[in-house]
Amino acid sequence: MSQEKIYDVVIVGAGIAGALAAYKLAAAGKSVLVIDGGKRTPDSRDAYMQQFYLAMAKTPESPYPNYKNTPVPLSLDIGNWKTERALEDAFKEGYTPPGYLIQKGPLPFCSTYERVAGGTTWHWSGTALRLLPADFKLQTNYGRGIDWPITYDDLEPFYCEAEQEIGVTGDTGNQGYHGITFGKDPKDPSKPYAYPMPEIPMSYLDKQVAQGVGSMSFDGQVVSVSPTPQGRNSVPYDERRVCAGNTNCIPICPIQAKYDATIHIAKAAQHGAKIQYRSIADKVLVDPQTGLVSGIHYVKFTDPDLPRTPTAPQGAFKEGVAKGKIYVIAAHAIETAKLLLNSATDQQGLADGVANRSDQVGRNLMDHPVQLSYAFNRNPLYPFRGPLATSGIESLRDGPFRQKHAAFRVEIGNEGWNWATGDPYTTLNALVSPGRNSVSGPNHTVQGGLFGSDLRNALNGFVTREFRFGSLVEQLPISENRIRLSKDYTDGLGIPRPEITYDVDDYTRSGYAAARKFALAVFQKMGATDMTFVNDADPTAFQFTDPDDPGAKPETYLLNGAGHVMGTCRMGADPAASVVGPDHRSHDHKNLFIVGSSVFTTTGTANPTLTIAALTLMAADAIIADLK
Amino acid sequence: MNVGELLPDFVGLSSVLTGYDANTIAPKVDPLDDNTVAMQYLRLMLAKADNEIFLQTLAVFREIVADLPDAWNWSNAKDPLFKPNIPADVAAQVKAQILSNAEMAAMSRRMIRLWYLATWYVNEPPDFAGEVVSMDAYKEGLAWPTIQAHPMGYSQLDFGYWADPPPSAGTTPPAPPIRSGASAAPPAATQGGKQRGGI
């Protein structure tokens, strides 16, 4: 117990929420300590790039470390989730599941995250959409889910602030759909608000799709393709260079043209914030007299890959308690819930964890399940050029249909079938191997045994015509979609691993079915050939039968994660049904704030990073006001 | 054995198999560079492939090109995309004398996968097991220029280039027939693919 300094604010986690909070608080003159499990951010990203280049499976996690003391979920684990559970049942003692998340089903949770300084913004797509006004009032408008305790108008100024901090490209003229409004220019209130950077051009592929969509309607909505606001530079901004279109935003931008939270870690440090790396917070301590948080207990380690066993060298681990006037948990939705649950004691009111009198901590885990549909266009679209996505279809993010099924947004991919089938690798290998070989189940097989010009022409002919839609489908808060502490398995530090139960309800399944129907309608209008293959035996498969069609048969869909881990500490006005109030303050402990996607009341359909940033900047104001 | 002595035959056969000019896949930029991607692949084949069959394959190729004028072996000009300068009769002889033999054909397929994907697969045909040869090799993988793109994560182009078709768009060959049918084999090995996830 070395440390006696009492900071104004102690923050757990150096992802985008922790980094932005640290920056804004430090810039306001507050003394700030950030605790993060990762190592110091490398001066250059070359080491990460090398690991990416040499990785066989270029998953979102492939460039980043996965240490025994800070393990992460891996995309490659998801396909094995049923096998892991079967082995666990068969062997019980002595079997340690290799996947970090203990997936209890009935469906696997398919999203992953990083535990390095900068967090998962290392591999966010850069898509910087605002939530819609209607997303905050889902219950009022459509009788679904619950309302947020704040409105779009409450958050709007902080969206502007977040867009400046991240550096977002866009044209307000293209983004004012579904009631989105923009305030005044924060620097000159006589002018209307403008995004800090000009719009990123739509890809050639986007423009061809937009032309193909033409004028059409779906579910009563007029459909159009629009350029996406993005957290990557279209002009030099914040001392970073412009995007060179590496088509690699996920897993890693090679040139940091895309924003990541290491930028605000550095800025926070410039303003005097202290960043303490290689330290995992494992308990939030509460003063039994006052009910206030009294410290954050952490374990610091010298080697992140050296487990804390009885034989580990002395001095390799050090425990400590970080003290502050105010505490902020910003550890990402799963790790934040894990920390609060792991802080349970026999103290009054803490039997189920800290900040958990409502019993909502860990519940309402949400994602944007992604429906992938992919096709061949008649003419070449030249994918694998530009950022991973530059446009989308936002038309179905809201409408009266939300009474019946989930909303969705369509991301138009610039990477062909890379996500869907692993191209260009899969097609190349299929064209080379002898015989007739599958690229997408029985839907698309190719004649193999090619070489020379025949091979070149065939690979080009197929892959240049590929495109895909990824529809991000809204998910409602469900109490039993939740994180618990595993009773059986721990990480290298002896901290329980997260155990997940997860399912997708009929509202979202029905939205999934609508997204699939929509993709097919667009493909047909474009004259493109759908090649989507669904294997009923896939470990992510689920079924849905359209209840409005008496003759309908169950259709199978495949679950994909968006990497958008939300819920687990939801925001609400009612202390009995939520974890934090509208100012991000714990209902139970008034010097404890929780920030990040864990507080999302509902998901809407916007990629969450911009909203995380806006909410965090709003919470920072509440903290600054508290400290006055 | 002097590895360098095998290089002309290795590059020549690679050229026929990949459909790219020898000068494109193995440009003689720096005569002292002993670690070009071509040399990396050649050393890897000698280290990991069945040497008897590999050397036999190169020997058969040497016979095929023995009577050709020197001009072709290391062609000097970079030809436009999709018009490689490979004599049709050489390709025909490679097909007849090398690809008709199961073992030499498998060896040839390994070479194609190396050049296109910079990947050494443990098994042929491949599954998931394997390794990316090197960072340089990844960046020079032929799959990328073939689809008129750049390696994912390695663009040397300028901001906004994606708004237009690639400059080589005019050379894009016509669409291949898309045919659905029963698959003779399970899906080929994938990298990334379904595992990628996350937007």
Image (cartoon, coloured by chain):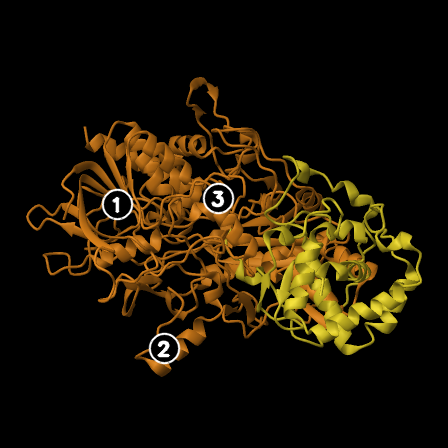
Chain colours: A orange, B yellow
Q: Secondary structure at mark 1?
A: loop
Q: Residues within 10 Å of mark 3 (few under 14, many from 20)?
A: some
Q: Position of residue A336 (x, y in %)?
A: 30, 52
Mark 3 or 2: in front is 3
Separation of marks 2 and 1 at Cα, in angstroms: 41 Å
Q: Residues within 10 Å of mark 1 (few under 14, many from 20)?
A: some
Q: Position of residue A165 (x, y in %)?
A: 42, 32
Label 3 chain ID: A
- Residue carrying label 2: A88
Question: Which amino acid type corresponds to the residue marked 3 in the rendered image?
Answer: Arg
**Do circles 2 and 1 both sit on a common chain?**
yes
Earlier in the chain: of badge 3 and badge 1, it is 3
- Residue carrying label 1: A573
Instruction: Tell me the tag on residue A45.
Output: 3
Question: Which amino acid type corresponds to the residue marked 1 in the rendered image?
Answer: Ala
Q: Quadrant of residue A96?
A: bottom left
Q: Residues within 10 Å of mark 2 (few under 14, many from 20)?
A: some
